[in-house]
Image: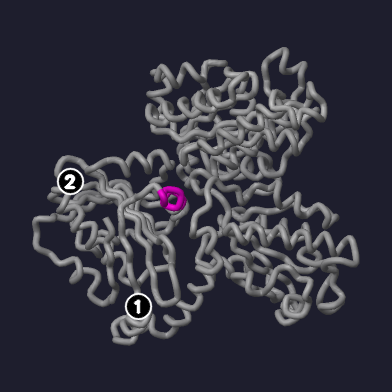
């Protein structure tokens, strides 16, 4: 990336590649609403081709609102840009959000939105005397929108009033506006189906100040729902929800130690001298950060350490200080040496086998942050002040770990990765002898079982998550909203497979997804993806055997699949060839392949001969 040039000059020079990179960085660092809006308007000056070249995810979003929402739309597009998402937008007419959905607006139908955002508030409440009727109104609207447009929904929550008619009695009085809005928000979240998510503006108003949330002069003049400063908060939060809905969230928190996880330098002070816990305000601030980080770990965020330290010195506080909340067993990868931190973060990425865009870096040193930012722009950076008392709020406000669902795999992620380390130790040495019996014996010793079954409602969040996060072993890198996954699941002639792998070390979790859609007598493989953690264990061939069986039972005579290249999926370029498919076309590096189900060819002979693996199919 060119240094010293801003996005404005880069656009003037028509250097769209670096202008886009600079805009992404600008969106993460700027706070001034006017400067952000100026940057947002520049997005349309970048050709669509550049977004494709930089592997942006294109998302089609319909913004339907009861307010004047143009500024929020523009800001949201900019914040989505910082997350690698190029938003194509439809803006509904002011106040006509309900009519657009109920009448299946033709223009909206032609737009084919992936998401519909409902930007609404208390002014749009209709049944003010009956909260149950109001809840049912919104549930019916969601259902209609989803069935008509096959879109997922993101709706703003309703904001509790800053001005209370009953004073402190507001909390106790069931007739109060506060009670009504609170019950409405709770009722909506309880009734929301899986395709509905919320942009919690009520929380944002509480966080940033209800009394200052809305600029009433601005609202009376133009019906803009919040002050300029708070429009930024709404849009940034909304962009995080969109990103989380398609799996664009971070997965691993990289922790510095000295003056980050504890106060002081352990190499100078020793493990007993660093500040942790009670006894000093500094120690309590660092302990509070540790407790917050542990809560992130419990909900599925991986923790790693990247410290400039002697390794033994770095580990001593974990081993000897009883007041350390975080233990060594909570850390998935521990790297302490004197090498540059960007190099060590890349080492952690290789060891955990996850992309650099999955990482967030937490370090008190601004020089280290800037070095990582410049060398590894994919890594999220938490900007910390000099005061450790503010570390938790900075980490929380970043929204890097936003989520719209919580799966079994999320809750067990650290255990899954630690178990995978044990598997890798078992493979060590044998993998280099692929043609010998050694490798086969290692696989037999794993006692693997592949459990395959169609998509189901219980696993929809994880299926959608896996589809949108898998990049390397992914034949088409096609992304789906949960609503689109449901559409495939409900098609009686479509093939939908989810696969889990278990072995003697435990459950690998869901590791593969296959989606095939009918085209006359051909089953078209829309999407085939798999976790790289389970490569070379026979999963691919075994799963294809099940695809063949299911395709035959559905009456298909052939299977057709595409390979669409991306920046990360070169490893599967020859995948269909290895399975025994015949190439039928190639255009622009994309290739199309066909497997004739009428021919008597054994998939086991083609691909699965060396891999002992028990397959269990649950229909």
- Helix, strand or loop: magenta stretch: helix
Q: Which residues are magenta?
A: 458-465
Cα distance, mark 1 to mark 2? 35 Å
Q: Quadrant of residue 203?
A: top right
Q: Nearer the viewer, residue 382 or 159?
A: 159
> Label 1: how many residues lie within 10 Å, few (<14), some (14-19) or many (20+)?
some
Q: Nearer the viewer, residue 43 or 140?
A: 140
Point out residue 476 in the picture as x, y percentages from the top left corner: 35, 50
Point out residue 50 in the picture as x, y percentages from the top left corner: 49, 40
Side of 68 relative to 443 (left or right): right
Point out residue 261 in the picture as x, y percentages from the top left corner: 76, 65
Depicted 129 relative to depicted 329: above or below: above
Residue at (47%, 53%) from the top-left corner? 469
Q: Is residue 464 magenta?
A: yes
Tell me the residue that label 1 is attached to.
447
Q: Quadrant of residue 232?
A: top right
Q: Is residue 124 visible?
A: no
Q: Nearer the viewer, residue 279 or 561?
A: 279
At numbered mark 2, what does the secondary structure look like: helix, strand or loop?
strand
> Label 2: how many residues lie within 10 Å, few (<14), some (14-19) or many (20+)?
many
Q: Nearer the viewer, residue 612 or 72?
A: 612
Evaluate if marks 1 and 2 touch, with contact meaning CB atoms under 8 Å apart: no
- Number of the front mark, 1 or 2: 1
Farthest residue toward the top? 221
Tell me the residue that label 2 is attached to.
522
Residue at (72%, 12%) from the top-left corner? 221
Residue at (47%, 25%) from the top-left corner? 141
At numbered mark 1, what does the secondary structure look like: helix, strand or loop?
loop
């Amino acid at each position: 990336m060119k240094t010293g040039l801003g996005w404005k000059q880069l656009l003037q020079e028509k250097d769209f590649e670096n202008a886009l990179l600079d805009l992404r960085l600008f969106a993460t660092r700027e706070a001034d609403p006017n400067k952000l809006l100026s940057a947002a308007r520049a997005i349309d000056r970048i050709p669509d081709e550049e977004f494709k070249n930089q592997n942006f995810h294109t998302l089609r979003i319909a913004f339907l609102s009861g307010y004047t929402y143009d500024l929020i739309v523009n800001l949201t597009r900019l914040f989505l840009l910082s997350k690698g998402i190029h938003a194509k937008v439809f803006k509904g007419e002011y106040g006509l959000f309900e009519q657009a959905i109920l009448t299946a607006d033709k223009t909206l139908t032609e737009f084919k939105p992936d998401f519909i955002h409902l930007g609404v508030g208390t002014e749009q409440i209709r049944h003010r005397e009956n909260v149950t009727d109001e809840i049912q109104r919104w549930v019916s609207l969601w259902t209609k929108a989803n069935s008509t447009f096959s879109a997922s929904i993101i709706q703003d929550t309703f904001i509790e009033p800053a001005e209370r008619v009953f004073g402190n009695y507001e909390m106790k009085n069931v007739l109060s506006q506060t009670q009504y809005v609170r019950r409405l928000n709770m009722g909506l979240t309880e009734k929301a189906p899986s395709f509905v998510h919320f942009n919690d503006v009520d929380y944002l108003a509480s966080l940033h100040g209800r009394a200052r949330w809305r600029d009433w002069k601005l609202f009376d003049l133009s019906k803009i729902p919040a002050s300029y400063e708070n429009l930024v908060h709404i849009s940034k939060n909304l962009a995080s929800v969109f990103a989380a809905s398609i799996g664009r969230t971070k997965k691993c928190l990289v922790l510095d130690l000295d003056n980050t996880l504890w106060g002081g330098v352990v190499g100078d002070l020793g493990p007993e001298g660093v500040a942790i816990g009670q006894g000093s305000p500094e120690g309590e601030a660092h302990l509070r950060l540790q407790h917050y980080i542990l809560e992130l770990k419990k909900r599925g965020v991986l923790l790693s350490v990247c410290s400039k330290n002697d390794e033994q010195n770095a580990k001593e506080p974990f081993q000897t200080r009883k007041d350390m909340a975080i233990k060594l067993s909570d850390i998935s990868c521990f790297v302490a040496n004197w090498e540059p931190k960007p190099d060590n973060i890349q080492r952690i990425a290789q060891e955990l086998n996850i992309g650099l865009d999955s990482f967030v870096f937490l370090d008190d040193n601004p020089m280290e942050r800037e070095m990582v930012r410049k060398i590894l722009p994919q890594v999220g950076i938490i900007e910390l002040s000099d005061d450790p008392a503010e570390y938790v709020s900075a980490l929380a406000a970043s929204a890097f770990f936003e989520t719209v669902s919580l799966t079994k795999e999320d809750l067990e992620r650290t255990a899954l990765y630690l178990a995978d380390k044990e598997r890798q130790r078992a493979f060590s040495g044998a993998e280099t002898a692929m043609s010998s019996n050694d490798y086969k014996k290692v696989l037999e010793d794993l006692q693997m079982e592949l459990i395959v079954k169609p998509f189901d409602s219980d696993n929809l969040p994880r299926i959608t998550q896996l589809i949108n996060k898998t990049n390397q072993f992914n034949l088409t890198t096609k992304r789906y909203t949960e609503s689109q996954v449901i559409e495939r699941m409900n098609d009686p002639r479509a093939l939908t497979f989810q696969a889990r792998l278990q072995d003697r070390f435990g459950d690998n979790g869901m590791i593969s997804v296959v989606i095939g859609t009918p085209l006359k007598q051909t089953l078209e493989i829309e999407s085939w993806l798999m976790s790289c953690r389970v490569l070379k264990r026979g999963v691919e061939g075994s799963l294809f055997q099940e695809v063949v069986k299911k395709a035959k039972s559905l009456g298909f005579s052939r299977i057709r699949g595409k390979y669409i290249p991306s920046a990360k999926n070169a490893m599967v370029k020859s995948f269909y060839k290895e399975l025994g498919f015949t190439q039928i076309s190639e255009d622009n590096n994309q290739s199309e392949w066909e497997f004739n189900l009428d021919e008597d060819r054994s998939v086991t002979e083609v691909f699965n001969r060396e891999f002992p693996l028990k397959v269990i199919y649950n229909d």
